[in-house]
Every structure is written in C-alpha cells, then in structure tokens.
Amino acid sequence: MEPLQSWRSIGVSLVEQIESLAPYEVDEWIANWRIHNLPLTELSRALWYFIICPRVRENADLVYQRVDMGRSLLSIHNSTPVTGWAVVSHLIKRSLTIFSGERIRNLLRSGGEGDLRTAWQAGSLRSAEWHTDRQIRLFGIHSVLASTLPPAMPQPVPTFLPSLWTVSARLGQWWPPIGETPDFRLATRSHAQWMTSPYRVTVLPPPSESASIRAWEPVQYVIDTIQEFPRTPEMSGNLLACYGPDSAGLLMSRIAHCTSELSNRRLTALLLEVMAHLLQVSPVIRDMDQLSKHLVAVSDWLWMSRLAGSAHDERAAIWGAWGWFLAAALAFLAPGSGAVIRLSPGLAEDGDEQELWQAYTEGNQQSAITLANKIGDVDQLWQDVEDEALVSSSPAPLRCVWTFKPWLVEKPFASPWVPAPVRIMVEESRRMARDGAE
C-alpha cells in the first residue's frame, strides 16, 4: 500500500490478495496487514466481496454458506477486536476452501428489453443482473427488495432467498460496493434461477380470518394447536411433506380463527413469540441445522414484508411466513404437551449471569433456560449470547440469534428472547461434544 493511498481504494487489490492465498498462509498475511493498521471493516468488506462473487459451479449449499458467513460479518462489528480478527481469519480460511471455483467476472454491457421482474421470470441471469444494477443505481437497494414481494414474487415459500437478500441488504447499507458490481449480483442470479426451478412448490394461500375464538393467551393457544396436531412418520424431517393444505395449511386455518382483530404488527409479533417459546419447550428438536435455516429465513421474510406496497400485500406475506414456519415446526419439532414458560424480564440479581454461563458450560439445559428467563433481555446479556454463538462450531446458534435480533427494538409483547438461542447453544454444544467423542 502506498503512503498516501486510501484504504477504500485498495478494495479490489485486497480481494485479489485474498483469492491468491492458501489457507495456511492466512494467519501470517493478516498479521502483516495488522502491522500496517489495516481496519477490520475494510478487510471484512473485501472478504464479503470475495465470498459473494458468483462462481462457475454453484449450488444451494454454497449459498447457505455465504449467508452464514454474512451473518458472522454482521455480528463481529459489535464484538471485541480480538474476536473480530479471529472470526475473519477463520472465514477467510473457510471461504478459500469452499469457494475454489473460478469467479464469474462482471462482463455486463447491456440488459436487453423488459424489466427486472420479466428477467427474473424468464430466468435470464445476465439480463437480471443488468436490470438489478440499473435499478439500484437509480432507486436504491430497497427498490430491489420491494420487487421480491407480491405481486412480483407471490410465493414466500421455502427457499434461501429471503436470508440472502436481507444479509446482502444489511451489508450493502454499511459498505459501498467494490468495483462496479453491488453485493446484490449473487442474490439476483439466485432469484432468476429459483423463478424457473422445477422444485418450486405451490404456495399456501392466506387463510380466511375471523374472531370466532377468543384466545386470552394467543401464544399458548397457537403452541397447543401445533403440538396437538396429528403427524405421520412421513412428515418427520420432511419440510415439503408438511407444507401442504392438509398440514401447515390446516394449522393456519385453525390459528386464523382468532386473528382477524390483530394488526399486521401484532400478527408478526405473535409469530416471533411462538417461535421463541417453541424453541424452549419442544421436547425434541430434530435436525437443528435445517430448522435454524428455516427459522431465520422466516424472520427475514417478515422483515422484507414491511416493504410491501400495501397493508393487504404485507398481510399476505406475513401469512406466507406463518405457513412456512408451521411446516418447519411440524417437520423438526416433536409433538408434546409443553407449557409456555412464564417470562418475567425483571432485573438480574447479582451472580445470575455468571450462573447462566456456568450452567451453559456444564451443559445443564434446564438451568440455563431458567436463568436466562430470570435475567431477561438485558443488552449486555444479549451481546454476550451473540458473541458466544459467533464462535460456536455449529452455525445454528448464530442463526437463532439472527432470527430475533432484527426485532429487538420493537417487541410489542416485551418478552425476553434470550432463552431460545441459549437452549440451542447448549443443545448444539452437547451434540458437538458427543459427535466429537464418537
């Protein structure tokens, strides 16, 4: 780097240097840059650009890997520098191992006729890229996100796209793009491919709402409805088998008997509360990796629903998220008679947080959940939970944190959400220790 050169001007060079590294060279390379006072944010920015660049060989698993890495990059900005540098070092090594395929260079010249929606529906990758680039330059990132909602994208069905869009949007708002291509290039390509995919499923329509049932405790009512729903062996672990009119659709209809008087905001809040409670009380969680992917994508879809052009479209998107979540609950949460844990935020007593982390270290799930409920959502505890999830060997705890984190500032029911990720952290820690011992 030249003495008078700006950090922002070396972004392309940083990406090329990352690409040329071998995994065993990463630590020494980072140590050299830290001697030159390379800002962690600039290295994170270059790393994200390297991660998000489309590759010649792509698949859905690579997209999930990118989304997980994006959430890690989002999380380290509130963590300590020591944690941040360690996480970035790990991500560089991992990305060099995973994204070994050749990058698809940006060779766009023109986009052809039509608009972004037409390009998506036709599955035209180059045209979709061109129109997205043009729309972002003219109208901003949120105009592209709004294009993914009804009627442009009338199917909020199981897919990685909501998480890919939202992670790209959050990181794109922090950093200017490196070079000519915004972070949304990969999301645009994935969207165009999904629109023409043979694996798309028929969307569950929003249910007919009424107020025929007076649910004094709506969270308890919904949880009881989910846990009492009869399930077949074929539904276990099979999301698509649970996403149909006779399963998730039927559950939606039962829940809709008491929702007509709820505003869009309260219907969203109810879903988030049910998600948090079920993560605490479900007797068995099957395949936490898959469940956590779907929970955070449902939360991302709820966030995107607020960009809908009307309250009616927003409500349809919220019900789409409900259907998706109910299918995930039927597939990955065992039925049971668990009762809602009564949450009282209150004030933490001296030593409570220390006891919580001691229970976590010992793998004492029930004590950890009880203490987390007792302490409530104190800012520092939430940040500690996120930091711990950030360095977990499993991606599920951090996904669980990001299921609820975007909603921390507007919790209408004022219930603490810390116990949900705490349970997942304990459960995944146990699993990793068990699997490592075998």
Image (cartoon, rainbow, N blue to C red):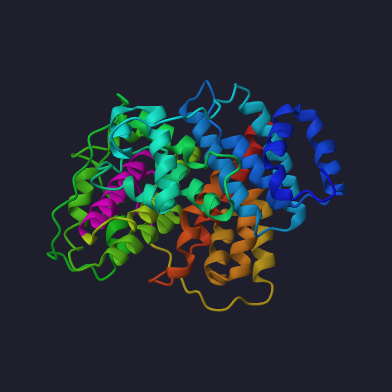
Residue appearing at x 35%, y 45% in the figure: 329
Which is nearer the eye, 72 or 353? Answer: 72
Q: Is residue 399 visible?
A: yes
Is 330 one of the magenta-colored residues?
A: yes
Q: Position of residue 76 (x, y in %)?
A: 66, 53
Tell me which secondary structure the magenta stretch mostly adopts.
Answer: helix
Give the position of the N terminus as an image quadrant: top right
Which is nearer the eye, 283 or 52? Answer: 52
Q: Position of residue 406 (x, y in %)?
A: 48, 59
Q: Position of residue 401 (x, y in %)?
A: 53, 54
Residue appearing at x 38%, y 43% in the figure: 334
The image shows a total of numbered marks equal to: 0
Q: Is residue 416 left or right of residue 25?
A: left
Residue lying at the far front of the rendered structure:
109
Residue 434 in the image: above or below residue 146: above
Boundaries of the magenta span? 312-339
Give the position of the C terminus as an image quadrant: top right
Q: Position of residue 191 (x, y in %)?
A: 38, 35
Residue appearing at x 56%, y 65% in the figure: 372
Is 144 one of the magenta-colored residues?
A: no
Q: Is residue 426 visible?
A: no
